[in-house]
Image: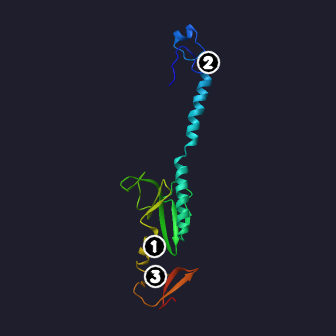
Amino acid sequence: MFELVENVCLYCGKLLKAKKIEEGAVFCNAACEQREARRVFVLRNAALAERPTKVAIGNVAEAQVIKDLEMRCFHVFRSVRSSAPCDIIALKGVQTLRIEVKTAVRVESGKITQAGPWNPRASDVRAFVLADGDIVYDPTPESLILQFDDEIRRCGRCGRDITNDHKVAKQWYKGELIQRLCASCCA
């Protein structure tokens, strides 16, 4: 504990003159008042400077998601504008995924809470980056790639439906399927 002493300057600790006490002053002169104001300003701004900004936190979260997606063999592209509809574009084969990155917290019940709204029309996947560094995808990128792969297949040249066609020519590039061609007219 400390002892509160009245009638002394808050900055230098000197006794205040009777006239200053009558005026209700807490500093012995203008110089002490200015020094104290500067000291308080520096302390407040130092505390703000140590705290990371929302943009910096978001950038770190996006970098973590990019690293994770690259480890899963996706080609990843990051938006350069903060007003873009999604944060990351991920490519695998011919499929494109739009990913929105959110920082989130896992509550005691195990549910994940996020800050801010999500626009499902602007992105296919939400990537939640938790405080402990874990990343939770909703839905997982791999499940969307498989889902798209099971949809209607069209010829890469003429556009003919080749979903049930057993004679399909496939073009591969570096181990990845780049397009399917109908064997009857385009292969």
Give the crowd class for mark 1: few <14, some 14-19, many >=20 residues within 10 Å: some
Separation of marks 1 and 2 at Cα, in angstroms? 70 Å
Q: Is the residue 26 above or below the residue 82 in the image? A: above
Residue appearing at x 48%, y 62% in the figure? 99
- Classify residue 166 as left or right of residue 2: left
Q: Residue furthest left?
A: 109
Residue appearing at x 41%, y 84% in the figure? 163
Q: Residue furthest top?
A: 18
Dot 2 amino acid type = Ala
Q: Which residue is mark 1?
A: 145
Q: Is the residue 72 above or below the residue 157 in the image? A: above
- Please indicate, yes or no, whether residue 75 appears anywhere in the rendered image: no
* Percent of width and height locating residue 112: 40, 56
Separation of marks 1 and 3 at Cα, in angstroms? 20 Å
Which quadrant of the view contains residue 160?
Answer: bottom left
Residue appearing at x 55%, y 82% in the figure? 172
Tell me the SS state at disc 1.
Answer: helix
Dot 3 amino acid type = Gly
* Mark 1 or mark 3: whose residue is earlier in sequence: 1
Q: Which residue is mark 3?
A: 159
* Percent of width and height locating residue 29: 61, 16
- Classify residue 48 as left or right of residue 108: right
Give the crowd class for mark 3: few <14, some 14-19, many >=20 residues within 10 Å: few
Tell me the SS state at disc 3.
Answer: loop
